[in-house]
Image (spheres, rainbow, N blue to C red):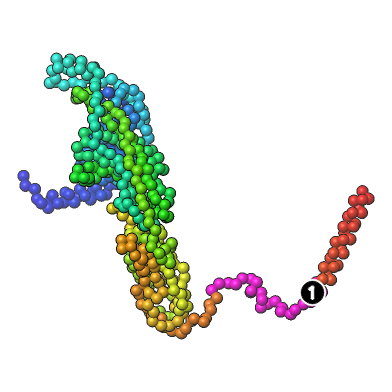
Amino acid sequence: MKVQIGNIAFFFWALFVSQSALGQEITIKLGADEVAFNEEFKITVTVNNGRLKSYDNFPDIEGFIKRGTSSASSTNIINGQISSSQSITQNYIPEKEGIFIVPSFKMRINGEEISVPGKKVKVGPEKERRDPFRDPFKDMFDSRSRRQAQDYIDVEEDAFIAFTTDKNEVYVGEGFVGTLAFYVAESNRAPLQFHELGKQLSEILKKLKPTSCWEENFNIENINGEPITLNNKRYTQYKIYQAAYYPLNLEPIDFPSVGLEMIKYKVAKNPSFFGRNRQEDFKTFYSRPRSIKVKELPPHPMRDQVAVGNFRLEERISQREVMTGQSFNYEFSIYGEGNISAINNPIINDDGNFEFYDPNVAQNINRRNNRVTGSKSFNYFIIPAEPGEYNLKDYFQWVYFNPSEEVYDTITANVEMKAFGESKKNQSIIASDLGEFYDRIGADSNVLEARSRFDSIKTYANIVILLMLILVAAFIFKK
C-alpha cells in the first residue's frame, strides 16, 4: 500500500499541534503496599502530553536497595485526539522481611517540584514463581541451596575522595577554585553508593570552609559522573562541592582532612538468580589535608583597595554633545575574571567642569566551568558646568592588580564628548525646600526688641506662682 508523503507530513504536524495544545501532566506513583521478598517495589514518574526532560534522583528507602531503572513511552489516538506519555521507573529490591516506611519526598520533574506523601510497605516471604518449562528436580535442589547461609566477600575498591585546588599559592584577593570530589576507577569492581550525602555534606563544609576567605559557591545540585584521566588512568569524577575562594588576609589557608561515608556492598560468594547477591556495608573514605600559601601584593599606594584579577572595560554614553546644565548618562563597566563583589567604584577627578552624582551599580556573577566571571557596571548621571571638548579618561580611572602578569594596571575611560553653551560653573541651583523656618523670614519683623520687656513679664509670673503656692500650703495646714 502506498502512502502519500504529504499525508505523512500532515499526520506529524497534527501530532505536534495536538500535543502542544494539551497541558503537561506529571504524576509520581508508588508501588504496592505489600511485596514478597523476591519481588520489587517500584516508584514510577509519568509525564503525560509532554517529554520527560529532567528529573531528580529517586529517594533512598531504608530496607531496600536500588536496582536499576526502566523507561517506557506511548502515543494513543482515540477519536482523533492524540495523547502521549513517557515514564521512568526506579526498582527497589528488599533486603529483609518486615514493615518499612517510604518517607515523604519531593522530586523536581521538568523543572516542576512534585511532593509525594510516604507510606508503609510490608515485605513478606518469597513467592513461588511458576514456570511451565522448569525442571522440578532442579527446583528442589535450588530451593535447598537457597536455604543454606550465603557467604559474602569484601571486594577491594578502586576509589578515593580528594579535595583539590587549581593553585598552590595566591596573592591576597586572588581567586582559586577548590573541589571536593569522589573518584571511581574504571577498573573498580566493588559496588559503591552515596549514603545520606546532604547530611554528611553540611558537616563536612563546617570543617572545610575557610573563615579568612570570600566564597563564591558553585552550588552543585545534581551529582553526575564525568570521565577524567589521572596519571594515565581513567576515572569517573563525582563532584560533591566546588567553590572559588578569595583570601582576605595573609593567613595560610588550611583545608583539613574530611571523611565521607559510603555504602559499600559485599558480594555473594556463590551468586544466584533468586537469592541476595550482595550485602550492605559501610566504609569511610578520607581526603588528604591541603594548604594554600597567601602572598602579599607588591607595594602600591592603593594596595589595600584594589581588586585582583583579569579585567577589561566596556563603556556607554547617552549622547556625545550636550548643553551645559543638561544631563547625560555614562556607564563605566568592568568585565573579567576575579572577585566581582570586591570591585570598587572608579576614581573620579572632579575639577569642577562637571557635576557627578553617585552611580547606580549593577552586578552580574557567573560560576561555571571552574571559573568565576562577571561584570560590575557604574551608571553615572553627569551635568556639564563648563563648555568645551572633553576626554573622559581625564575624569575616570580604575586600578587593579593583574596576578597573571604580577603588575598593577589602570583602566581609563576612552569616550570623548563636547559641552556647549554658557558657563554654569558659578551658578548655584537650589533644588530642595529649605523648610518652614526660612519661609517665615520674609513675613516676620526684623525690628530689634529690648530684653527688659520680657524680663518684667517673667518677674510678674513668678510672683503669681509664689502666691498660689502660699495659698495651697495654708489650706493644707488648716485641714
Q: Quadrant of residue 67?
A: top left
Q: Is residue 85 visible?
A: no
Is 154 drawn above or below residue 169 in the view shown? Answer: above
Residue 478 placed where, x, y %? 93, 50
Q: Residue at x 6, y 44 (%)?
A: 1
Q: Secondary structure at mark 1?
A: loop
Q: How many marks?
A: 1
Decide whether the magenta segment is chiefly helix, strand or loop: loop
Front-most of 262 and 67? Answer: 262
Name the amino acid, label 1. Arg
Front-most of 77 and 25? Answer: 25
Write down the region rendered in magenta: 431-454
What residue did someone put label 1 on? 451
Q: Does the magenta-highlighted stretch encompass residue 317?
A: no
Is 43 drawn above or below residue 168 in the view shown? Answer: above
Crowd tier of the residue under label 1, counting other residues whose Cα lies within 10 Å: few below 14, some 14–19, many 20 or above: few
